Image (cartoon, rainbow, N blue to C red):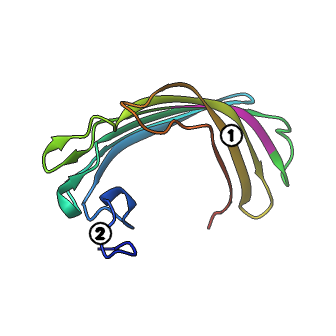
Amino acid sequence: NEKDVRGKKFEPELQPGSGSYDYILGGVFEQQVDRLIFKGNTIYTFKTEGAQNFEFGNLFSTSLFLDYIINPKSEAFKTKVGLDFNYQLAQKDRKNGVKDPDSGGNTLFVGPAFNVDGPKDISIFGNFLYPVYQDPGGVHQKMNFVWTAGAKLEW
């Protein structure tokens, strides 16, 4: 229900939250062969209609991660470098039951990644993904890149 300076409601995609209930189904795998680690996941998100009779399109995403352990004998700072692949397919959004022609599309991202497992279940990680293929599903903004950095504490 957020409004602009004129008192008009922002478009649904500019609201904080969609007002819908979304359901996620997916799976993951991991296999290590010596110093090489193969990981992957697949997720399908079923979107439902939310506020303002707007429904974001369902989303399919699958990723493959190839990591190489640089220093496998290290116990304090085990370091991995890798290559990440991610494919996303978004279906068309709907407003009042009508598909938005300028929504959806598919993108394939590829890029380098790193992970450092520190002492006491602490790790830092990051990746930089570049879109090697984009079909934006109409006239709307393309992605230049996506990057992620973070820290993880396991307990």
Residue 64 occupies which quadrant of the picture?
A: top right
Left or right, 129 with respect to 87, comes to right
Q: Is residue 80 magenta?
A: yes
Mark linked to residue 128: 1
Q: Earlier in the sequence, mark 1 or mark 2?
A: 2
**Residue ID at (86%, 38%):** 71
Q: Give left or right: position of 87 versus 77.
A: left
Numbered tag placed on residue 9 in the rendering:
2
- Per the rendering, the mark at residue 63 is none
Corner quadrant of residue 106: top left
- How far apart are labels 1 and 2 at the CA level? 35 Å
- Camera-near label (1 vs 2) is 2
- Location of residue 17 in the rendering, given as x and y in whole percent from the top left corner: 35, 65
**Identity of the residue drawn at 22% across and 64% down:** 51
Type of amino acid at the residue the image marks with label 2: Lys
Q: Quadrant of residue 53?
A: bottom left
x, y percentage for residue 11?
32, 59
Comparing 153 with 142, the one in front is 142
Q: Residue furthest left?
A: 97
Q: Is residue 36 among the parts visible in the rendering?
A: yes
- Could you tell me which quadrant the C terminus lies in? bottom right
**Residue 144 sits inside the magenta stretch:** no
Residue 3 image offset from top left, x and y in percent: 34, 73
The chief SS type of the magenta part is: strand
Question: Which residue range is magenta in the image?
Answer: 79-86
The tally of labels here is: 2
Q: Is residue 66 visible?
A: no
Q: Position of residue 120 (x, y in %)?
A: 76, 64
